[in-house]
Image: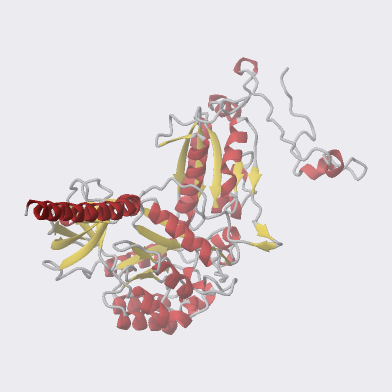
Amino acid sequence: MIEQDLPGQYIDDIEDLISPDDIKPRERYENKKNVTVRAKKQKQRSQIKIKSDEEVDDAKTLRAPIHESVIPGTQKVYIKTWGCAHNNSDSEYMAGQLASYGYQLCSGKDEADLWLLNSCTVKNPSEDTFRNEIESGMQNGKHVVVAGCVPQGGPKSEYLRGLSVIGVQQIDRVVEVVEETLKGHSVRLLQNKKVNGRRVAGASLALPKVRKNPLVEIISINTGCLNQCTYCKTKHARGDLASYPPEEIVERARQSFAEGCCEIWLTSEDTGAYGRDIGSSLPELLWQLVEVIPEHCMLRVGMTNPPYILEHLEEVAKVLQHPRVYSFLHVPVQSGSDSVLGEMKREYCRKDFEHVVDFLRARVPGLTIATDIICGFPTETEADFEETMTLCKKYRFPSLFINQFFPRPGTPAAKMERIPANLVKKRTKRLTDLFYTYEPYAGRVGEIYAVLVTEISHDKLHYVGHNKSYEQILLPMRKNLLGTRVHVRITSVSKFSMMGDILDDESEWTRCDRRQEDKRQKQQNIESLKESRWQKLHHPYLGIALVIGTLAYVIHLLTRLISSSTLN
């Protein structure tokens, strides 16, 4: 039977189907707590009569197979992530749970049964790529599950209709969402997690993980923020500040080192605001973490906005000087103009930012400060942009993230009159040209650094290590080098990195893999225990033997003495 378009067949809202006299869903399902609706079975292609170009496109789209039951280990899942370190950590947690349940994680799209796409809502291009990836998956007959800030911040988007959604605070339920999606169902979990009526930071930090880099653990210490930036869509997804308890974060760090990590990244939408909702603070957390970082392992502090770091500058400076903490901080300024900062509602002025940079640079030797700039904010005048240029000229930031303004739907800035696109591009180019006029690593050839090697370069030709200032140093790909701390001499420099030669013999490399230390310590403990048990077991018998030996010797002497007397 061919369906026909009839008046009233398509409605704008499901509520249009319900009259006041109808039975309420609560009454209908009050005794059925777990009701799952199976999607209608797809019609055979031979039964479909093509009437329009749109229907032709639909007919060309492969249908994802519907699984009556899901046996762990028989389906493959492909995971793709956009955005920040927080998003990457969420993907690692979801991958860990799926792998623990038996699903096979694959790097190839084509071989996967289901695509799990974890999105970022900061910029229009990343959302456009995310949307295109969804369409690609659907056209190739893949089941698609979406996660991250895009569906959380805009769940009613047309292109998300009918898809399963995992909210940013519901990543611990990824297994059930994937299972139901493979069965042809659509599941949406967007609720906030609450304990005793109070919103918490999210899923447990103790969940299993499959790390993109086995040597680096990313720990999200809080979610959301205290700001109301007029251009930011992430606030719509992550919400207000909610911090994890310090003891949970510290325990996660212990667990990570025990699993072989040698570097920890702390991440959130604003690490500087950590703890304000639970009576703690970032410095308090950092000092607790320093106590559990093994020797030769390192900690990197994530992005912090200027307002919430100002009152902690003294303590933060002390922590950044610690030998197991990178002398690195990411402090996004976004603009050098107080007028623009006010329109952005950034809650600080240029002098506040300069105070942060000057204070920390004066007290932390070799400190690296990274920052962000938005070019072309709607109210930015030429004079405003010149202030941004002078700020960047003054500090010559070695790491400068330059972004064009993108109007994100639902934000106050999206309603402001935009600057002409060609002017925005011109300003972006001017700032980029300024950035390339200086060499952060000039004069470093011949310098010697201790470097922790944790990554492989994008071109797969070098290992990547970082010195105390978290400066990138490329090294030859020698066997067993990953996860070690070595001394290197700089041989050449470029705009973004340095090249080095390893000075130590392999026997002198310091391995940061905590598991090896644990094995050695365990073996030492076993040997000590054996020795102790042997001593306890044999100690009384040794005493008896000594007494018997002494008596035998005395008897022997007496016997000789008696024999001599008799002969005489």
Quadrant location of residue 511?
Answer: bottom left
Where residue 520 appears, as percent x and y from the top left, is 29, 52
Name the residue located 58 percent from the left edge and 57 percent from the top edge: 202
Where residue 352 appears, as percent x and y from the top left, is 44, 83
Quadrant location of residue 372?
Answer: bottom left
Q: Nearer the viewer, residue 537 or 112?
A: 537
Q: Please determine whether, in this image, residue 496 is positioned above or below residue 273.
A: above
Name the residue located 41 percent from the left edge and 71 percent from the top edge: 331
Q: Quadrant of the N terminus?
A: top right
Where residue 376 appears, as percent x and y from the top left, is 44, 67
Quadrant location of residue 18?
Answer: top right
Q: In which quarter of the image is the C terminus?
A: bottom left
Name the residue located 58 percent from the left edge and 31 percent from the top edge: 182
The total number of labels drawn is 0
Look at the image and tell me whether residue 521 can be seen.
no
Look at the image and tell me whether residue 260 can be seen.
yes
Q: Which of 162 and 532 is in front in this view?
A: 532
Where residue 411 appears, as percent x and y from the top left, is 58, 63
Judged left or right of residue 446, residue 151 is right
Q: Nearer the viewer, residue 395 or 403?
A: 395
